[in-house]
Image (cartoon, rainbow, N blue to C red):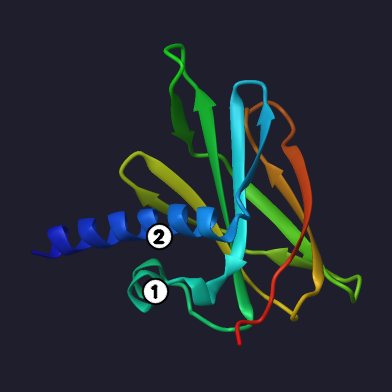
Amino acid sequence: MVTMTRTFFSRLIALALILLSSLAMAEQYQQFGDYQVHYSAVNTSFLTPEVAAASGITRSRATGFLNVSVLQAQPDGSFKAVNAPVDGSIKGLSGQDLPLSFRTLRDGDSIYRLATFGIQDGEAMRFTLNVGLERDEPPVAINFMQRLYVDP
């Protein structure tokens, strides 16, 4: 019963993360050779209470979360999730770099790196990510800017 419940919640989390990325229209990715680095930042209030609890995310009107996943192209044209290290930071209007603390969520063959952070309503936030794709190579850098809004 515990395994069935855990599997159900894992699939529910994965589905919610995919749907939220699409609904928020915030999903983006960058291509680096055979790798795609997908990233999406949304307000945690978009998560259902069940998905938030199962994934260990506290829902809040003023908290966002960043989801990062790395896929590698396979010879047959498909993509496979890669367990790539991710670190990064956010810079808001204050100009201060705030480090992101990522944790890993696995669902079957999918691997997600999740980090939560505080948001100010409508503040332009600059995200800097460093993603390790190859063991003996320096990480690739991804920079993007996004505005998130406090949920009324």
| Residue 73 in picture, x, y percent from top left | 51, 22
Q: Is residue 148 above or below residue 127?
A: below
Task: Give residue 48's quadrant in the image.
Answer: bottom left
Q: Nearer the viewer, residue 92 or 18?
A: 18
| Residue 121 in picture, x, y percent from top left | 74, 81
Tell me the residue that label 1 is attached to: 48
Q: CA distance from mark 2 to mark 1?
A: 8 Å
| Residue 25 in picture, x, y percent from top left | 60, 55
Upstream in sequence: badge 2 or badge 1: 2
State if disc 1 and disc 2 touch (CB < 8 Å): yes
Horizontal side of 145 relative to 15 (left or right) equals: right
Tell me the residue that label 2 is attached to: 16
**Which residue is depicted at the point 61% across and 49% down?**
39
On residue 118, the disc is none
Secondary structure beneath label 2: helix
Q: Nearer the viewer, residue 52 or 101?
A: 52
Q: Is residue 40 above or below residue 42?
A: above
**Which residue is depicted at the point 78% across and 51% down?**
144
